[in-house]
RNA sequence: GGCCCCUUGGCGAAACCGGUAUACGCAGCAGACUUAAAAUCUGCUUUCCGCAAGGGAGUGCCGGUUCGAGUCCGGCAGGGGCCACCA
C-alpha cells in the first residue's frame, strides 16, 4: 500500500542529515583524494529582503551542476555569500529609521534560511558578506596594492549631482534627467574621483574574450562592443586665430580617407578650447550654457537638432595648402569619445551633412561606389553633393588627389602614411571604454583607505591601521554623506607628517566588492585577501551562472580585477570564469482588475473558465506574460510554493520545459504538474516493492525480452541525461526522467521473474540517482525506500553501458525522391545492398516508384534510404 | 541609427554533424475505477480530405544549394536584446 510522499516532512529531515554529516563541506589538499576540482558559482545575491523566483532558478541550476559534478567524482566548491553593500540599505535606513547594517544582516538571516530550505548543496562554512569588516578590510588592501602598482588614478570627472539630496547619483538613478528620490533636476558636476585605469587594459580585455570559448557568444559580443575598439587616425589641424599661434586642433577619425571631403571642424561644448573661448565670446558662452541644459537621456538626444556656433578660428587642412576650415562648437560632438573634436565630412557622415546643410557648408563627395561607369558615377556624385543623405558605404576615393582610385581600406592607409610623413597626424586606436570611476558619496560601502593631508597630499592608510571601519553612529536624517558630516570619523593625523588631516569620505562602488568575491571564497578566512595555494587550486571558476544583466559591467570588472590582482601577486590567472552561463528570467501572466489596477496572482481565480477577482468576483483582464516584478504584481513568492509543495517541486518545475538560457513562464498548472510528478515518482518506487530483488543483487546471466527492454531503457535514459547535464540542457534532462518513468510504468514482467525483479530495480535506482541533482530530498527518501542504508549524495553517478545503447534492429525510413513513403525494420548491421533490396520490395515504395527507372540510391546506415527515380 | 539574436502544434518546447519533424510536459477531449468526488490509470490530441484503409499539406514568408533543408546560403516580414549623436 503506497502512501503519499510528504515533502514538507521529508525535506527538513534530509537537510539536517546533510548538514550533520558535513556532506557539502569542501575538501582541499590531501583530503581532496586526488579528485579533480570543480568550482561552480552562482552570482551572489543582494540581500534585499526575501528571495525571489529568479534566485530559485539561478541557485537551482547551480545546485544541479554542483550535485552532478560531485556524483561524478569531482571535488566541488559551491559557496554562497552576500553582495551586501549598496543604496537600498541606506534608503531603508531613511524610511524605517533603522541602521543599514541591521537591515542588511536581518535580510541575510532571512534569505539564508530561505536558501537552506531549498536544499542547496552549499558549503556554508565559507559564507561571508561584503559588508563584513573582514571582507572589506582585504578589499582595502587590494586597493592600496593597486594604487602602488599604478592601476589607480584620481582625476576630475563629470558626475550626476542631485542638488536636493546633495549626492552623486549613478546613471541608473537618474530618470528623465531627475533624481529618482528627490525628483530634482540633476546637474552635471565636475568632482575629483578615484578611477581604476581599466582603459590601460582595453586591448588585453578585448583579446582575452577570444579565449573564453565556454562563454555565450552574445556576452562576448556585448563586451566587445562595450570596449569598442576602432582603428583610425589622430589628425592635427594647425589653428589660426587662436591665442596660442602654435596651437593645433587634435581630432580623432576612423575615416582619414575622407579628409579631402572635410568642410569644417567641430569641438565639443566641453572641450577646453570651447571653455577658453567662452570667456571672451558671449555667443559661445551662451551656447555652452544651452548645451549643458540639454538632457542626456536617449529620448532627449533623439530629438535634439544639430546646432553649433562658429568660433571664428580657422583650421588649416593638412593636405591642401591654403585651405582653411571653419571651426565650430557643436552640440553633437561628445567630449568623452576620441578627442572631443572632429573634422566634418558632410558627404560621408549623416550628422555632418545635417550640420552642413543647416549652416550652408560645402558638401564634397570623395568616395564613390565601386563598379560604376563614368556617367553613373557623375550622376551619383551630383546627387550626393546636393542631397540630404550621406554615403557611408564602401567604395573608391575620388576628388582626393593622391588617394584617387584607392578603395577605402587602402585610402585610409595611404592617408595615414601621408599624415605621418607631414607630422600632422598618426594612425591610432581609439576605445569607447572609459576608466572605471569607483568613488561614491555614500555611507554603506567600503571606505576608500586614503587620507588627505594638506602638506603631504594623498596618503595611503598604513597597513597596520586597516581596516578603515565604517563608524556605526551615523544618522540619515539629513541629505548628503553621513561619513562627511560625522563629528570625528574623518579627522585623523596624517600618517606621514602627523599633522591634522582628513579621511577620504567616499566609499567604493559596490561593483568593486563583487569583482573579487569569487577569489575570496577560495580562502574566506585568510588574513590576506587571497591564499595563493587556494586560488591556484580552485580558480578559474569552472561554471559561473547568473543573469545576463551582468553581461557587461560585473563580468568586465571582474576580468579586469583578475588581471590587476595577478599583477599584484594575489592571483595567478587572467580570466576568472572559464565557463559562463546566463539564465533567462522567470515570467508570469499579468492581471488587471476592472479599475485598471494590477492584481497579484493569488487575487485571481478561475470561475467557469473566466478569470475573476477572488473577493469581489469582478472580471479580471489577463495581460501579457512578463518577467516577475513588484510593480506589475505578477510575482510568486518562492516560500509560499515551497511551503505548499516542497522545494523539490519548485526546483523541478523551474528546470522543466524551458531551456535555462531562455525565459521560463511560471504557472500554477505547471507547478501542480511538477508536484504530481513527485508523487508519481514516489508511487513508482513504493508500488510492488516486494517484487524487487534486494539491493546489490548481481545481474542475472540472461534477461528475457521485457527485462532486456527495460534494461536498455534505463541505460539509454542514463546516457542521454548525462549528456544533457554535461551540456546544461536541463529541460531535456527533465524530459529523460519522464521517459524513463514512462518506461517503468508500462513495464510488464515476462516469464523470468528474477530478470524482471532485477531490471525493475535497476530502472528504479537509475531513475532515483539521475533525478537526485534536481530533486535531492525525494531521491534520498526513495533510496531508503529501495532498501539502501547509504545516502544518494554519497553514491557515485551510474555508468551507462555503451553496448546497451544500440538496438539489434534499426527502423529505417524509406524515401522516394526525398519523400518518406514507408519504414523498414532491419538488422542494424545489414549492408546497403540488403537495405536497398528490402526497401524496393515494399509495396508502398513500388507504388511510389511507379515503374520508373531508378537513378540513384542513397543509404545512410541505421537512418534512412532515399531512392531517386 | 549601429551590432546581434530569435520565429516549430492550443501553449512551454524536442529534433546531436543536413537524414523518419513535433520527444517530454502543460492544457484539452474520451474512457476506466468510484455511490460520488478527489486522486490515479488508459487512450486520443499538427492540419486538411476520408466511415476506414489511405492520401495531401506542413517548422514566419519568398527564393537558392542538395538525393534529402526546421537545420546551410540570399532576400523579406514580425518579435526581442545590447549599444546609441562613438566621428
Image (cartoon, coloured by chain):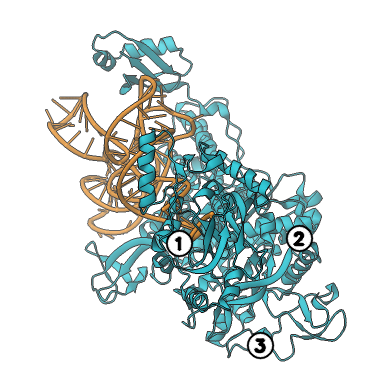
Chain colours: A cyan, B orange
Residue B5 lies, in percent from the top left, at: 45, 45
Can you identify the residue that label 1 sits on?
A645
Residue at 68% of width from left, 78% of height from top? A506
Q: How many marks?
A: 3
Q: Residues within 10 Å of mark 1 (few under 14, many from 20)?
A: many
Q: Nearer the viewer, mark 1 or mark 2?
A: 2
* Marks 1/2 same chain: yes
User: Image quadrant of residue A817?
Assistant: top left
Compared to residue A808, the image places residue A787 above or below, namely below
Q: Tell me if mark 3 has few (under 14), some (14-19) or many (20+) residues whose alpha carbon lies within 10 angstroms of its own.
A: some
Residue lying furthest front: A322
Parent chain of label 2: A
Is the C-beta separation of discs 3 and 1 under 8 Å? Answer: no
Residue A663, placed above or below residue A613: above
Spatial separation of the CA atoms under disc 1 and disc 2: 37 Å
User: Which badge, 1 or 2, comes first in the chain's sequence?
Assistant: 2
Residue A397 x/y as whole percent: 49, 41
Q: Which mark is residue A474?
A: 3
Asked whether the residues under the numbered discs 1 and 2 touch, taking CB atoms below 8 Å apart as contact, a structural biologist would say no
The secondary structure type at the circle numbered 3 is loop
* Residue for badge 2: A523
Task: Judge by depth and name the residue closer to the eye, A735 or A554.
Answer: A554
Between discs 2 and 3, the one toward the N terminus: 3
Amino acid at each position: 500500500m503506497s502512501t503519499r510522499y510528504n515533502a514538507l516532512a521529508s525535506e527538513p529531515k534530509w537537510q539536517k542529515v546533510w548538514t550533520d554529516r558535513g556532506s557539502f563541506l569542501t575538501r582541499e589538499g590531501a583530503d581532496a583524494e586526488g579528485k579533480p576540482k570543480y568550482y561552480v558559482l552562482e552570482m551572489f545575491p543582494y540581500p534585499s529582503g526575501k528571495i525571489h523566483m529568479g534566485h530559485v532558478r539561478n541557485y537551482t541550476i547551480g545546485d544541479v551542476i554542483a550535485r552532478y559534478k560531485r556524483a561524478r567524482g569531482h571535488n566541488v566548491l559551491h559557496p554562497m555569500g552576500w553582495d551586501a553593500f549598496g543604496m537600498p540599505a541606506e534608503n531603508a535606513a531613511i524610511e524605517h529609521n533603522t541602521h543599514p547594517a541591521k537591515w542588511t544582516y536581518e535580510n541575510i538571516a532571512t534569505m539564508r534560511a530561505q536558501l537552506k530550505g531549498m536544499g542547496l548543496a552549499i558549503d556554508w562554512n565559507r559564507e561571508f558578506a561584503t559588508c563584513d569588516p573582514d571582507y572589506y578590510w582585504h578589499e582595502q588592501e587590494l586597493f592600496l596594492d593597486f594604487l602602488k602598482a599604478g592601476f589607480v588614478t584620481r582625476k576630475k570627472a563629470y558626475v550626476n549631482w542631485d542638488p536636493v539630496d546633495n549626492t552623486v547619483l549613478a546613471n541608473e538613478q537618474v530618470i528623465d534627467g531627475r533624481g529618482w528620490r528627490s525628483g530634482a533636476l540633476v546637474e552635471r558636476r565636475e568632482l575629483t574621483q578615484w578611477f581604476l585605469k581599466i582603459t590601460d587594459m582595453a586591448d588585453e580585455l578585448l583579446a582575452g574574450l577570444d579565449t573564453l570559448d565556454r562563454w555565450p557568444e552574445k556576452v562576448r559580443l556585448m563586451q566587445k562592443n562595450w570596449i569598442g575598439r576602432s582603428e583610425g587616425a589622430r589628425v592635427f589641424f594647425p589653428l589660426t586665430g587662436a591665442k596660442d599661434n602654435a596651437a593645433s586642433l587634435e581630432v580623432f577619425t576612423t575615416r582619414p580617407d575622407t579628409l579631402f571631403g572635410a568642410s569644417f571642424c567641430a569641438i565639443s561644448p566641453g572641450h577646453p578650447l570651447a571653455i577658453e573661448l567662452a570667456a571672451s565670446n558671449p555667443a559661445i558662452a551662451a551656447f555652452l550654457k544651452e548645451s549643458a541644459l540639454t538632457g542626456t537621456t536617449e529620448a532627449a538626444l533623439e530629438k535634439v537638432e544639430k546646432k553649433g556656433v562658429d568660433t571664428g578660428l580657422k583650421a588649416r587642412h593638412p593636405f591642401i595648402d591654403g585651405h582653411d576650415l571653419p571651426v565650430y562648437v557643436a552640440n553633437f560632438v561628445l567630449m568623452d569619445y576620441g578627442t572631443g573634436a572632429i573634422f566634418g565630412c558632410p558627404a560621408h557622415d549623416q550628422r555632418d551633412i545635417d550640420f552642413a546643410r543647416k549652416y550652408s557648408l560645402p558638401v564634397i563627395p570623395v568616395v564613390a561606389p565601386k563598379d560604376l561607369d563614368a556617367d553613373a558615377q557623375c550622376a551619383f556624385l551630383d546627387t550626393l553633393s546636393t542631397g540630404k543623405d550621406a554615403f557611408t558605404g564602401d567604395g573608391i576615393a575620388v576628388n582626393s588627389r593622391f588617394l584617387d582610385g584607392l578603395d577605402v581600406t587602402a585610402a585610409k592607409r595611404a592617408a595615414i602614411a601621408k599624415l605621418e610623413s607631414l607630422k600632422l597626424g598618426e594612425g591610432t586606436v581609439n576605445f569607447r571604454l572609459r576608466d572605471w570611476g569607483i568613488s561614491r558619496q555614500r555611507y554603506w560601502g567600503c571606505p576608500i583607505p586614503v587620507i588627505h593631508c594638506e602638506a603631504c597630499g594623498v596618503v595611503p592608510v598604513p597597513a597596520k591601521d586597516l581596516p578603515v571601519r565604517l563608524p556605526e553612529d551615523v544618522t540619515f536624517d539629513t541629505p548628503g554623506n553621513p561619513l562627511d558630516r560625522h563629528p570625528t570619523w574623518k579627522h585623523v593625523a596624517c600618517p606621514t607628517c602627523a599633522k591634522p588631516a582628513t579621511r577620504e569620505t567616499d566609499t567604493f562602488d559596490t561593483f568593486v566588492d563583487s569583482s573579487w568575491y569569487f577569489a575570496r571564497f577560495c580562502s574566506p578566512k585568510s588574513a590576506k585577501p587571497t591564499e595563493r595555494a587556494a586560488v591556484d587550486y580552485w580558480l578559474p571558476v569552472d561554471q559561473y551562472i547568473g543573469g545576463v544583466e551582468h553581461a557587461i559591467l560585473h563580468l568586465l570588472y571582474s576580468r579586469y580585477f583578475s588581471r590587476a590582482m595577478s599583477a599584484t601577486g594575489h592571483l595567478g590567472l587572467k580570466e576568472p570564469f572559464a565557463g559562463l552561463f546566463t539564465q533567462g528570467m522567470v515570467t508570469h501572466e499579468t492581471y488587471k482588475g476592472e479599475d485598471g489596477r494590477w492584481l497579484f496572482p493569488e487575487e485571481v481565480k478561475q470561475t467557469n473558465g473566466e478569470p475573476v477577482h477572488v473577493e469581489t468576483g469582478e472580471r479580471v483582464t489577463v495581460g501579457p506574460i512578463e518577467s516577475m516584478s513588484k510593480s506589475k504584481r505578477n510575482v510568486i513568492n518562492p516560500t509560499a510554493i515551497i511551503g505548499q509543495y516542497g522545494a523539490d517541486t519548485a526546483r523541478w518545475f523551474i528546470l522543466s520545459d524551458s531551456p535555462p538560457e531562455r525565459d521560463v513562464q511560471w504557472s500554477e498548472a505547471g507547478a501542480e504538474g511538477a508536484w504530481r510528478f513527485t508523487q508519481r515518482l514516489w508511487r513508482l518506487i513504493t508500488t510492488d516493492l516486494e517484487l524487487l530483488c534486494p539491493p546489490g543483487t548481481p545481474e542475472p546471466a540472461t534477461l528475457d525480452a521485457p527485462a532486456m527492454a527495460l534494461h536498455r531503457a534505463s541505460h539509454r535514459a542514463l546516457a542521454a541525461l548525462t549528456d544533457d547535464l554535461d551540456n546544461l540542457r536541463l529541460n531535456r534532462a527533465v524530459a529523460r526522467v519522464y521517459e524513463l518513468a514512462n518506461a517503468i510504468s508500462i513495464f510488464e514482467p515476462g516469464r523470468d521473474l528474477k530478470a524482471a525483479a532485477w531490471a525493475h530495480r535497476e530502472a528504479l535506482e537509475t531513475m532515483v540517482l539521475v533525478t537526485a541533482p534536481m530533486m535531492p530530498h525525494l531521491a534520498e527518501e526513495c533510496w531508503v525506500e529501495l532498501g539502501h542504508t547509504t545516502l544518494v549524495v554519497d553514491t557515485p553517478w551510474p555508468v551507462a553501458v555503451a553496448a546497451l545503447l544500440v538496438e539489434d534492429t534499426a527502423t529505417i525510413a524509406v524515401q522516394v525522391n526525398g519523400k518518406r513513403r514507408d519504414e523498414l525494420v532491419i538488422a542494424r548491421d545489414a549492408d546497403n545492398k540488403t537495405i536497398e533490396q528490402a526497401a524496393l520490395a515494399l509495396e508502398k515504395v513500388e507504388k511510389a516508384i511507379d515503374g520508373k527507372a531508378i537513378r540513384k540510391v542513397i543509404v545512410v546506415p541505421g537512418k534512412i534510404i532515399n531512392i531517386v527515380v
